[in-house]
Image: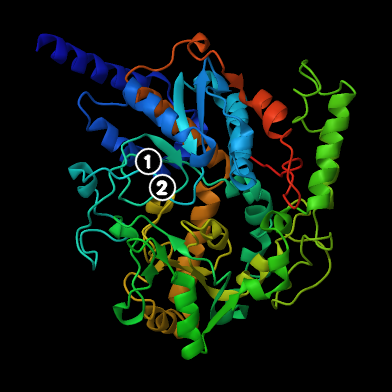
Amino acid sequence: MTLLVASLALALLQIAVARVAAPLPEHCEKYELIYPQIERDFAFWDSQSPPGISVDTMREAVRLFARGPARGMHFGFIDGKAYVLTPTPVAKYSQTFLSRQLVYLDVLDDLEAKYGHAIPNCEFVLVTTDIPNQKPSGTLVQQQELQQGWGPGTSHPHGIPGLPSGTYPIFRASKSDAYAADILIPHHDFYLLRYDTTVLNASRRLLSPRELPWRSRLSKAYAQYDMHVTRNRHPKDAFTWRAGAGDAPICDGPGGSICFVRRHFWGILEASPHPSLDVRDSNATAASETHLVDLHTPRHLALAIADAAARKAASGGGGGGGSSDEALGLLDEAAQEAYQATLVWGTHGGGGSSLGASGSVSSDGESGAGGQSLPDYLLAHARHKLLLHLDSHGLSSSLERLLALGSTVLVESSGYYGYYTKAMKPHVHFVPWWTRNPEEVFSLVTTLLQNDGEAAAKIGARGSDFARGYLTAEGRACYWLKLLQRLAGSLQHAPTALADFPHALPVRHFRNQHVLRKRVRRGQRSLYGQPFEP
């Protein structure tokens, strides 16, 4: 008994020391609004006895999730350096999910450069599935206690759910309250779509009263999605249950694991068109033939900068020593500047022109900052006062792009959320819809457009301010730092030496020697030249 008490006290002391051992840099203090999600994510692990993540739990997480079929990898920081602690054959991953892991390899490499000295030794498993993939094994009281806050909670129309009991500490970009053990991180699309440059900076001028005043925006709610995409969910996760018009069931498959959310809403609009709703099926547009990444960074330009980097590495000009393969990921500064300068309207795959004050399109090529312009599909959204958000297979990364445009975003209450979602306030930064019935959108749109949408204009402005204030590259990097420091404090036994992981590889080495060298099959998109921006 005495030994048990001593062990518990030691675990508590380790967590307390780790939390205060490395204060955040001063510039990270301004992002305090989004940090509470970290504490919510670790509340489950703090409730364990003894508190924290045990070695056995982490080893099981690695065994179950750090492999191709589970779309996960085992990462860690040791002595300020980022590693793939348990390398997995890249051939086991599909090209889509390997692409996402490549993004996070770049993220961790960037974090090492920025904050390696401030990141304690830690390890984690990062999974890139669209929805949580924990295996249910019963009901946890701790998870039921989380049924409150934004989104479906204790008042959920379908009652208190039988919850999946995911009990592994998995880093992922989205979850529902049914998955208390999961730990949220920024979505890969922030980096892949170069959010700061192609969204925040490119849309900055649109928000000026002279460039695109509120009165010149169309008094409609606009959306453009692939309306045939289905929603995935776990049958026991009632937080993500979706009901259609008149509470009609729209989920099918085993236990209702597939929900026809977009298709159902599309059918409602086809049956009863609304003059203030302009919802389009992107599957029927030319944009559907272009990869989303290319709309933000034209493929031929992305390949050009990758070629420049490879040539520099091959000539021994990669800098920092090491082999040419080690230097493959280092960008030629001159080539990078030229690359940024060419990202203007009129370039292939990248868009058109800047917006005039009337909302019409001109061709002066001077939108945003540094010559970067807003992709056409976002420009179309920005012309409307209201924007309709619909999640995808799971959480859709479109929300952060829509928030930046200054229009009022109606956010589907799907039950899924990301690392920043709960930092926003309903009817302050966004307007929730489909809290129970999709047809509630009609009355919401009518109300929001009253008096030229004056109330909606304020919500849109606050939503845009939130995106520009908290979702920046610096804000995301600070979130990662805070998260990793908190993780180290929750590990009952943090890794102490690289020797404990005999197969570990530096993230840059694993990226260059393994991921980028994977042979692609016919018809697959090569990972070489994949865009990235911290």
| Quarter holding residue 284 | bottom right
The residue wearing badge 2 is: 132
Task: Give the percent coordinates (x, y) of residue 53.
Answer: 32, 26
**Residue shown at 39% from the left, 57% from the top:** 233
Give above or below for 477 relative to 279: above
**Residue shown at 83% from the left, 69% from the top:** 363
**Disc number placed over residue 182 in the picture, else none:** 1
Dot 1 lies on which element?
Answer: loop
Q: Please, what is the three-letter code of the amino acid marked with disc 1?
A: Asp
Give above or below for 351 relative to 21: below
Task: Give the percent coordinates (x, y) of residue 378.
Answer: 64, 65
**Residue shown at 63% from the left, 34% from the top:** 90
Q: How far separated are the C-alphas under marks 2 and 1?
A: 8 Å
Dot 2 lies on which element?
Answer: loop
The scheme the figure's colours follow is rainbow
**Disc number placed over residue 260 in the picture, else none:** none
Task: Give the percent coordinates (x, y) of residue 334.
Answer: 86, 36
Q: Decide: marks 2, 1 in contact (CB < 8 A)?
A: yes
**Quadrant occupied by the N terminus:** top left
**Residue shown at 71% from the left, 26% from the top:** 513
Q: Please, what is the three-letter code of the amino acid marked with disc 2?
A: Pro
* Mark nearer the N terminus (2 vs 1): 2
Q: Mark 2 against mark 1, which lies toward the viewer?
A: 2
Of residue 481 and residue 448, the one placed in the foreground of this image is: 481
